[in-house]
Image (cartoon, helix red, strand yellow):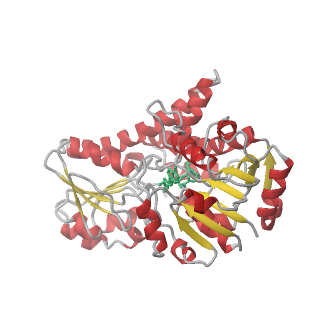
């Protein structure tokens, strides 16, 4: 069993720490956020991730804000720190480098410092430079978990990417991940660092491609769901990540595509493709909002109900959530905005926060579904329609069966559907 330290108790750090402790390792999780650590010491996870609370109260899992305590006899130190975007889209490494400088003073004995944050090519080298002179190897182990199913992703990974450039570090990490056997893909550090950005950029490209097709469908009178099923049945394409929507968001896809673009520019290999992926994503939100505006002519004084705030279901993460763009555009047009999300409770100046979907819809001229929370499948549309001023529904995820809305006499709009009519020729 190894003695492991995790620096950064966010979605990635805490899930990694809790799951490694579950595997039997001694894990100390450190964060500079005192409130977060206090909360964890009381057994309370300060954000929503299904199944994580149950794992936090474990004998072999410790929490601290003290670097010396956390690093005492540490064999493997994971960096799970934020890597947000700079204003120009490149990756801001301040958190990673600040934490590494703190490590310098407290590491004792051989340690493998493993970068789990999503970082540009060359970052591990810079981390190694900061730690120069210490008995340390730096490795890269990019994280692929998805918020909302992170525990399951850790326990049943598709693959584990290890970028290592020393035999000792390789042996140490192979031992750690030994239960996952064949799933280990061992490579050089540069390839490991690039792999994470490549994966997220590929996913974002699929989404932007489908979002572009959805706009085309609306123009030419095709149905995006027919097209999606037609192309998804080709095993070379597959069905996943083909669902059009109101645009992608979250803490990873937008920032990672921007960062890969910055890396490409810096390497003198600019990418029109990545530029287009980002631009289509912005356009998708504008076009969705335009539908709302076109329906009403003028949104000033109208009330809209936003259903779902988090960037996707089963998380409370609001980073780059498309709901924020739609809300901002609606407020700018002079609309009153009422919002409801089952879990995410962000501070949204100018909005009325509601306890459920029916309260949000009270007196509204339109309801707008932004996040496909499962509970929205059980909305009673007769009841919803009764509390609304007008029965108008914009489905930003094609999540609610059209027939349900028709039965309750809603005027409804979806994404990538011909004139928003049900196909009548069958
Ligand atoms: P997060 O913001 O949820 O958590 C980061 C934590 O680091 C915070 O609690 C913060 O207080 C702490 N921190 C900041 N500076 C510190 C320091 N000097 N010492 C100790 N703690 C410090 O971030 P996250 O979502 O867990 O993401 C971490 C990294 O993993 C990012 O690079 C992200 O791109 C990547 N990633 C995230 C996901 C995801 O779904 N969230 C998935 C894969 C990869």
The structure residue drawn at horizontal position 51% and vertical position 40%, both measured from the top left corner, is 94
Residue sitting nearer the eye, 243 or 104: 104
The spot of residue 286 in percent (x, y) is 35, 39
**Quadrant in which residue 261 is drawn:** top right
Counting every numbered tag in the picture gives 0
The structure residue drawn at horizontal position 73% and vertical position 38%, both measured from the top left corner, is 190
Residue sitting nearer the eye, 403 or 199: 199
Furthest residue in direction top, as rendered: 268
| Residue 191 located left or right of residue 99 | right
The spot of residue 258 in percent (x, y) is 52, 35
Residue 372 shows in the view? no
Residue 221 shows in the view? yes
**Quadrant in which residue 264 is drawn:** top right
| Residue 351 located left or right of residue 324 | left
> Compared to 138, does 367 lie above or below?
below
> Compared to 278, does 74 lie above or below?
below
The spot of residue 31 in percent (x, y) is 51, 58
The spot of residue 19 in percent (x, y) is 64, 69
> Compared to 358, does 10 lie above or below?
above
Residue sitting nearer the eye, 81 or 288: 81
């Amino acid at each position: 069993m190894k003695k492991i330290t995790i620096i950064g108790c966010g979605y990635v750090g805490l899930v990694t720490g809790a799951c490694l402790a579950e595997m039997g390792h001694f894990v100390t999780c450190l964060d500079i956020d005192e409130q977060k650590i206090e909360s964890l010491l009381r057994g309370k996870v300060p954000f929503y991730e299904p199944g994580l609370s149950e794992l936090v109260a474990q004998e072999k899992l410790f929490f601290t804000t003290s670097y010396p305590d956390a690093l005492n006899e540490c064999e493997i130190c994971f960096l799970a720190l934020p890597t947000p975007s700079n204003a120009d889209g490149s990756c801001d490494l301040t958190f990673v480098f600040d934490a590494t400088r703190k490590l310098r003073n407290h590491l004792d004995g051989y340690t493998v410092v493993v970068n789990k944050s999503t970082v540009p090519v060359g970052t591990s080298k810079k981390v190694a430079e900061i730690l120069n002179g210490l008995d340390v190897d730096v490795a890269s182990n990019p994280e692929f978990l998805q918020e909302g199913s992170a525990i399951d992703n850790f326990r049943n990974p598709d693959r584990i990417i290890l970028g290592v450039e020393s035999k000792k570090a390789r042996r140490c990490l192979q031992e750690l991940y030994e239960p996952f056997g064949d799933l280990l893909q061992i490579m050089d550090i540069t390839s490991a660092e690039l792999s994470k950005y490549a994966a997220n950029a590929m996913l974002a490209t699929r989404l932007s491609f489908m979002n572009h097709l959805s706009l085309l469908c609306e123009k030419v009178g095709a149905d995006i769901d027919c097209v999606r099923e037609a192309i998804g049945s080709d095993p070379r394409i597959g069905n996943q990540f083909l669902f059009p929507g109101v645009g992608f968001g979250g803490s990873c896809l937008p920032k990672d595509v921007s960062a890969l673009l910055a890396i490409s520019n810096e390497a003198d290999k600019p990418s029109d493709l990545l530029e287009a992926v980002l631009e289509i994503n912005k356009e998708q939100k504008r076009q969705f909002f335009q539908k709302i505006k076109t329906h009403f002519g003028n949104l000033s004084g109208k009330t809209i109900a936003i259903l779902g705030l988090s960037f996707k279901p089963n998380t409370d993460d609001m980073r780059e959530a498309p709901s924020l763009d739609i809300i901002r555009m609606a407020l700018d047009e002079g609309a009153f905005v009422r919002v409801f999300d089952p879990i995410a409770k962000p501070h949204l100046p100018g909005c009325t926060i509601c306890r459920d979907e029916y309260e949000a819809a009270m007196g509204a001229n339109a309801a707008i579904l932004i996040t496909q929370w499962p509970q929205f499948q059980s909305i009673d549309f007769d009841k919803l329609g009764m509390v609304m001023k007008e029965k108008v529904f914009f489905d930003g995820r094609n999540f609610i069966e059209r027939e349900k809305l028709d039965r309750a006499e809603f005027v409804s709009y979806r994404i990538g559907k011909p004139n928003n009519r049900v196909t009548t020729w069958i």
